[in-house]
Image: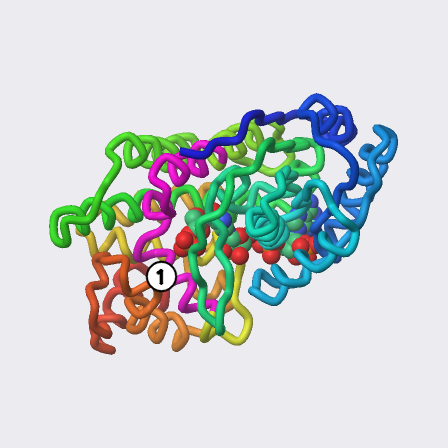
Amino acid sequence: MQLPRNVIAGPGAIESVGPICKTMRLKGRALIVTGNTTKHIAGDAVAESLKRSGYDVGFIVVEDATVKSVQKARKAAREMKADFLLGVGGGKSIDIAKLASTQLDLNFISVPTAASHDGIASSRASIIQNGRSVSRQAEAPLCVIADTDIIMKSPYRLLAAGCGDIISNYTAVLDWRLAARLRNVYISEYSAALSEMTARMVIDYAHQIKPGLEESVRLVVKALVSSSVAMSIAGSSAPASGSEHKFSHMLDQIAPKPALHGEQCGVGTIMMTYLHGGDWQRIRDALKTIGAPTTAKELGIGEKYIIEALMKAHKVRPERYTILGDKDLPYDAAVNIARTTKVIE
Ligand SMILES: NC(=O)C1=CN([C@@H]2O[C@H](COP(=O)(O)OP(=O)(O)OC[C@H]3O[C@@H](n4cnc5c(N)ncnc54)[C@H](OP(=O)(O)O)[C@@H]3O)[C@@H](O)[C@H]2O)C=CC1
Ligand SMILES: O=C(CO)COP(=O)(O)O
Ligand SMILES: [Zn+2]
């Protein structure tokens, strides 16, 4: 069970990255893995804080969560003889830093700039390998430093996407329990209960999640950390990734312009709740209240891609059994699911 030693969340936390690394007894040279946008939003400030504390700093900008980007980060770390890495940005940057540092046997600090996904504290990395999403075991961050000012100033759409990623735990756990009964898959009841609780919290408090509210950011960041911890307890992404994630990963493969990860997972949760015979309207209402997408139109994805992704989603991570089973859904069944749940017209 790999958990971060410290989670620091609050306004202006980014200014303390250098001193925090000192208290964590990290030495020497730091490599920052960041994105084109987030380098200016937070990467540069992290570098300044590290330099003020006496660290040498290098940068690597990544644009996708592929194996190639991991290799790019490893090469940069080797060339600058990095002593530790920091992932500063969204899920992509954090996952690349997470896996590269694991493979280099170096420490890693997670500095999320948005509350858009629940990988900020997890020991998992979701990497694109040969065009497909693969869930890789990695080391949990030594420390998570979440500057709530920066997260609050990020586009609200990212916070809403993070809520979608947490609400998706609802069907992920239903699938995990189904796989335990049907395929005798190991399930950690503690991890499942923690993951379910995070989804329930966001659903029950959906009316309190609004743009520009520090409390909303705090609630969602805590839920994202809890969801990460549930994955670390399970040693797998199963408590947070089921049929709804298969749907999202398949959309990433076939849609001309995929939406945000959490947005796609939220819409997937509506439809998979329906398949599980659950209260899909409650899921849909919570997402709507938060301002997250609930339809193909709001995702900006053509209806035909929604249907195709539903039909083929079972092919993603076939070793993970879910309500989707292990065969393509018939076209008419997929249309019925998407239409009944109002995802398509
Ligand atoms: N390992 C795990 O346990 C998990 C991993 N994931 C993975 O995380 C990824 C999804 O994360 P997500 O964050 O949605 O995707 P991205 O990392 O692609 O971030 C989405 C966009 O938001 C931008 N952004 C981030 N922060 C800010 C900010 N403060 N202001 C303005 N723009 C900002 C990013 O900028 P920039 O271009 O600079 O990066 C990027 O363009 C997927 O790859 C998913 O598989 C998701 C859940 C769990
Ligand atoms: O997105 C995740 C959890 O929210 C990680 O799941 P995957 O293992 O499906 O990439
Ligand atoms: Zn996710």
Q: Is residue 186 above or below residue 225?
A: below
Q: Mark 1 belongs to which amino acid?
A: Lys
Q: Position of 89 compared to 238: left or right? A: right
Q: What residue is at 74 percent from the left and 46 percent from the top?
A: 82
x and y percentages locating residue 277 in the rendered image: 17, 51
**Which image quadrant is residue 318 in?**
bottom left
Q: Position of residue 23 (x, y in %)?
A: 70, 21
Residue 208 in the image: x percent, y percent?
49, 30
Secondary element at tag 1? helix
Q: Can residue 342 be seen in the rendering of this structure?
A: yes
Range covered by the magenta-colored residues? 225-252
Residue at x-position 46% and y-position 72%: 253
Q: Is mark 1 within 8 Å of ligand 2?
A: yes
Q: Residue at x 14, y 54 (%)?
A: 183
- In the orientation shown, which residue stands out farthest toward the top? 23
**Most common secondary structure along the magenta stretch:** helix
Q: Which residue is mark 1?
A: 246
Camera-side residue: 71 or 245? 71
Q: Residue at x 66, y 56 (%)?
A: 74
Is residue 9 left or right of 250 when viewed as pictured? right
Instruction: Please check the rendered image and state whether residue 215 is part of the magenta-colored stretch, yes or no.
Output: no
Residue 155 against residue 197 in the figure, above or below: below
The quarter of the image holding the C terminus is: bottom left
Could you say which is closer to the camera, residue 339 or residue 145?
145
The N terminus sits in image quarter: top left
Using the rendered view, name the quadrant where residue 320 is placed.
Answer: bottom left
